[in-house]
Image (tube, coloured by chain):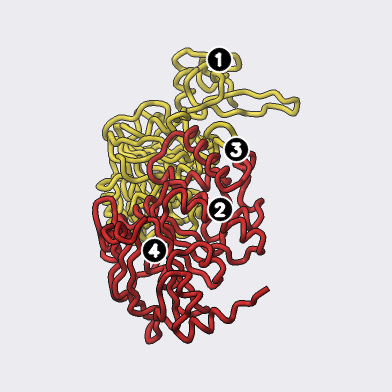
Amino acid sequence: MSILAKMKMQPLLSVRDLSKFYGGRIGCADVGFDLYPGEVLGIVGESGSGKSTLLSCLAGHLPPDRGEVIFDTREGPRDTVQMAEAARRRLARTDWAYVHQNPRDGLRMGVSAGGNVGERLMAVGARHYGQIREQAVDWLGRVEIAADRVDDRPSAFSGGMQQRLQIARNLVTGPRLVFMDEPTGGLDVSVQARLLDLLRGLVREMGLSAIIVTHDLAVVRLLADRLMVMKGGYVVEQGLTDQVLDDPQHAYTQLLVSSVLQV
Amino acid sequence: MTDQTAYNFAYLDEQTKRMIRRAILKGVAIPGYQVPFASREMPMPYGWGTGGVQVTAACLVPEDRLKVIDQGADDTTNAVSIRRFFQRTAGVAVTEATAEASVIQTRHRIPETPLTEGQILVYQVPIPEPLRFLEPRETETRKMHELEDYGLMHVKLYEDISRHGQIATAYDYPVKVEGRYVMDPSPIPKFDNPKLGGNAAIQLFGAGREQRIYALPPYTQAISLDFDDYPFAASKADHACDLCAAPDSYLDEVITDDQGSRMFVCSDTDFCASRRAAGHSGPMGTPSAGADEE
C-alpha cells in the first residue's frame, strides 16, 4: 500500500499523551502514536522501561492517569479510557486480542483445547456446539495443532503448543488489533522461529494490526513495520523498524542494537 | 412477640428478620440477583440449611403451615429436625402434604405436586455462585454478573459434551432468569428445572455460609442454558415408581440387598404416599399408603 493511501486512512488506534504513574514513579509518560490498519508496531526496551505498563494501559487492563486511547470501533472512533467497562470488555472479546507472555495466564488450564478456543465464540453468543467445535478444530489446524488434540487439556501440551493454542484462542473471533506481550518469551529458538513464522503468516493473511512488546530485537525485525524504543517510561526513538535498527540515533538505541550477540 | 425469657417468634430477633426481609424483597425485585445479607449463626452446622432456615424464619407468620423436605422426603434427618425446630420456636402448624403447606423449605427438590399462588418455596443453597468452579475470584464473578459476561458458563457445557457426548450436568443446572442473570438453582436435579420458570409460588433461595439470598418471584422466566444442537432435556431414571407406579416422577434408586437388587421409588414421599392412597400400586407396593413401611 502506498504512503499516500495510508495517509488518507483512519488510524485504527490513536494514542495521545498517555501517562501512567505508580505513586511518584513513572510507569510510562507522554506516549503518543498512530497505528494504521494492517500495521505491526514493535515496542522494545529493557526491563522496567514501561513496555508492559504501556501495553496494559492500551488494552484497558490498567487505567492510565492521563491521555487518550482512541480506537476506531465499528461505531466510529471512541476513547477506550472513557468507555464504560461493559463496552470495553465487549471490545476485548471481539475486536481485540491479548496474547500473554506466559500461556498459563491466557489459557484456562482446566478446560480442553477446544473449550479454550470456543470460549470467545460462546462469549459473543455462539450457541451451536457443532459449529463451535468445527471452528475450534479449524483454528487448531491453522496453528499447527493436530485435530485429535482438541479434547486434551493445555496442561498436556508443550510450551510452544500452549503458546500457539493461546494465539488460536485469541484470533478465533477475527479481532482487528492484537496485543502481544513477549509472545516468544520462554521458548527455545527453534520453537520461537516456528511461532514467529506462524504469527507473520497470520498477521499478513488476516490483515491484523498488532502491537508487540518484546526485548528480542530479532522478533521485531521479523514482525514489526514500525518500532518504538522505550527507556525509563519515555519513548526515546521511533520510526520504521529497519531504519531504527540499522541507523539508531539515540544513545540508548545504539546500546541496545550493539548489545545483540552476533552468532 | 413472646415474653423476654422465651425465644422470639421463629427464633430470629426482630432486627435480624428485618434485615433478611429486606434482602428477600431486594431479591424478589431483581430476580436471580444474589443479595448479600448478614447471615447469622444458627443452631446447626453450615451445609445443613442455615440459609434456608433463616429465610423460612423471616417469612413465617403464626398462621403459616410449614412443610420441610430433604431430597423430596419428609422423614429424613434434616427435614425432621428443621420441622421440629420451627414447631418449637414458632409453634406453627406443620404438614407433609404439599397442597396444604403455605411455606415449604426444601433441600435439593421441587415437589411433584404443582405449587399454587400464595405458597413460598424456600431452597437451601450450598453454593449460590453458578460461576464459582469456573472462576474462583469473587470480585471477578460479580463483575461478570454485572457485565452479563456469561461465555464461561457455556464453556462448562461445551466441556461436558466434548467429554461425555452430552450435557452431563445432572443437577445444579444453571438457568438464565428473565434474560439477565444466570442463576444457580441449588442442587436440584435438572428434572426439576422446568418447574423453576413460570411457577405460581414465590421461590426464595438462602445460602447461609455464603451469605447470599436470591429469589424467583411468581411466573418468572427461567431458561436452562443449552446449545442449539444439544438442547436441554430434563432427565430421570427410565423406570416407573415401584411403589406407586408413577411414570413421570423423579425417582431414587435404592439398593435393597447385596445381590444387586434395586428398586426405584419416588423421591417425593408425599406424592408417592398420596398416589398409593388413591389406589395406585407398583410391583413392590401395596395400594394403602404406609402399609409396606414399618
* Secondary-structure class at tag 2: helix
| Distance Cα–Cα, label 1 vs label 2 | 66 Å
Which residue type carries mark 1?
Gly
Disc 1: host chain: B
* Secondary-structure class at tag 1: loop
**Percent coordinates x, y for residue B201 in the rendering:** 31, 35
Disc 3: host chain: B
Reading the image, the residue beneath label 2 is: A198
What letter labels the chain drawn in yellow?
Answer: B
Tell me, for residue B282, which label it has, or none.
Answer: 1
Reading the image, the residue beneath label 3 is: B163
Check whether the beta carbons of the residues at disc 2 and disc 4 lie within 8 A of each other. no
Q: Please state which of residues A57 and A193 is positioned toward the viewer in this rendering.
A: A193
| Distance Cα–Cα, label 1 vs label 4 | 65 Å
Which residue type carries mark 2?
Leu
| 1 and 2 marks on the same chain | no
Which residue type carries mark 3?
Arg
Residue A199 vertical placement versus B184 (above, below): below
Residue B32 falls left or right of residue B135: left
Residue B37 vertical placement versus A47 (above, below): above
What letter labels the chain drawn in red?
Answer: A
Reading the image, the residue beneath label 4 is: A59
Q: Could one spot residue A25 in this view of the protein?
A: yes
Name the residue: 43% across, 73% down: A228
| Distance Cα–Cα, label 1 vs label 3 | 37 Å
| Distance Cα–Cα, label 3 vs label 4 | 34 Å
